[in-house]
Image: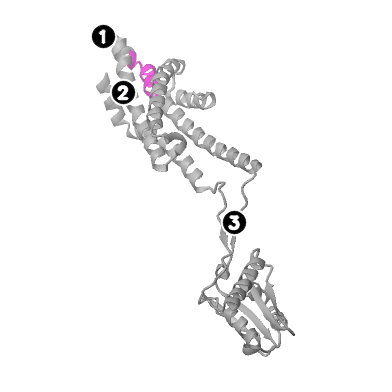
């Protein structure tokens, strides 16, 4: 009887293939979705500097005369090392006398280009006994105000120290998450775990119901009756059936565990002993599920009907 079950499985390759792969397919699909969709995570610190804008034009102006004014403008213009960033001195490189007129004309010439390539700027004016520095920023960018101040302060410290070796690094670090945010994140993680578990149960339900196809077919075609009349012991019939089915059940279970290891699902693998616990749980489930499916197979006379209804029953009941 055991050899007969083995030959029947080998001849029905399509049924065997779907029986073994459907649980694996459902689980992998759920894991891919869980891994692909962005989840809740702590925001990383953001360095605030002009390189975030890639191609950009930095404009500045020097109003007045004096060595200190030129030195401050020099340090401001020389701090940009990115080749995609162009530094424009309004007084030297244009016919405008101040930065306001220059920027207004750039906006009139092309507002789209202006909003993309003119994010920050500075104006240095020589007063009677001091230099007034004004930082300009384009509010189309959320961080432009902080970046222009960081850039201006960098030029000031270089001017005060009279060296380009001194630099101020400005970082926008996120505040710690509130208790409400932590609870919401934990809830979302539990929802993801439920999605994985549901797809896992769906695949196992399909696998469990597939074992009744052979039994219903044997009974409907009277093949089972002929075997009993021919002298087959019922114990041999059911024991060989159970042994072959448990082997077919263990194979996809091992594949599922390998899948969890490949996707590094810590809820099922951490600590490492959970791998053995999972395999034992699946083995005990198969030990209890197969006799129950055998019992329910007597309700049906059409294999396809029994398979569909038992699959629905297993999914809805969590069996």
Mark nearest the camera among 2 and 3 is 3
Quarter of the rendering containing residue 46: bottom right
Judge whether 132 appears above or below 37 on screen: below
Q: Which residue is mark 1?
A: 231
Q: Is residue 238 left or right of residue 56?
A: left
Residue annotated with mark 2: 244
Q: CA distance from mark 2 to mark 3?
A: 60 Å
Secondary structure character of the magenta stretch overall: helix
Which residue in the structure is indicated by mark 3?
173
**Percent x, y for residue 102?**
69, 83
Q: Position of residue 39 (x, y in %)?
A: 55, 46
**How many numbered marks are there?**
3
Q: Is residue 115 magenta?
A: no
Closer to the camera, 110 or 306? Answer: 110
Badge 3: how crowded within 10 Å, few (<14), some, or many (20+)?
A: few
Q: Which residues are magenta?
A: 213-224
Mark 1 neighbour class, 10 Å CA radius: few under 14, some 14 to 19, many 20 or more: few
| Mark earlier in primary sequence (3, 1) | 3
Q: Quadrant of residue 49?
A: bottom right
Residue 315 in the image, given as x and y percentages of width and height: 51, 27
State the CA–CA distance, disc 3 to disc 1. 80 Å
């Amino acid at each position: 009887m055991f050899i007969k079950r083995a030959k029947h499985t080998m001849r029905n390759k399509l049924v065997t293939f779907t029986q073994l792969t459907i649980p694996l397919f459902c689980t992998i699909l759920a894991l891919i979705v869980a891994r692909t969709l962005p989840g809740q995570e702590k925001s990383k610190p953001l360095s605030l500097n002009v390189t975030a804008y890639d191609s950009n034009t930095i404009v500045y102006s020097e109003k007045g005369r004096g060595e200190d004014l030129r030195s401050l403008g020099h340090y401001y213009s020389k701090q940009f090392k990115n080749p995609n960033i162009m530094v424009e001195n309004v007084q030297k490189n244009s016919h405008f006398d101040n930065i306001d007129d220059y920027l207004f004309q750039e906006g009139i010439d092309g507002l789209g280009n202006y909003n993309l390539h003119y994010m920050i700027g500075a104006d240095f004016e020589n007063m009677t006994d001091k230099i007034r520095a004004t930082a300009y920023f384009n509010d189309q960018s959320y961080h432009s105000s902080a970046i222009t101040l960081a850039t201006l302060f960098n030029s000031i410290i270089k001017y005060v120290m009279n060296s380009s070796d001194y630099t101020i690094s400005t970082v926008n670090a996120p505040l710690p998450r509130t208790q409400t945010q932590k609870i919401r994140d934990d809830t979302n993680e539990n929802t993801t775990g439920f999605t994985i578990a549901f797809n896992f149960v769906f695949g196992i339900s399909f696998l469990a119901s597939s074992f009744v196809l052979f039994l219903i077919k044997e009974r409907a075609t009277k093949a089972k009756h002929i075997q009993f009349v021919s002298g087959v012991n019922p114990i041999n019939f059911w024991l060989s059936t159970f042994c072959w089915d448990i082997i077919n059940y263990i194979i996809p279970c091992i594949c599922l565990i390998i899948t969890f290891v490949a996707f590094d699902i810590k809820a099922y693998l951490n600590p490492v002993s959970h791998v053995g616990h999972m395999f034992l749980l699946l083995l005990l489930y198969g030990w209890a599920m197969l006799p129950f499916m055998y019992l329910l197979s007597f309700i049906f006379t059409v294999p396809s009907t029994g398979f569909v209804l038992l699959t629905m029953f297993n999914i809805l009941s969590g069996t």
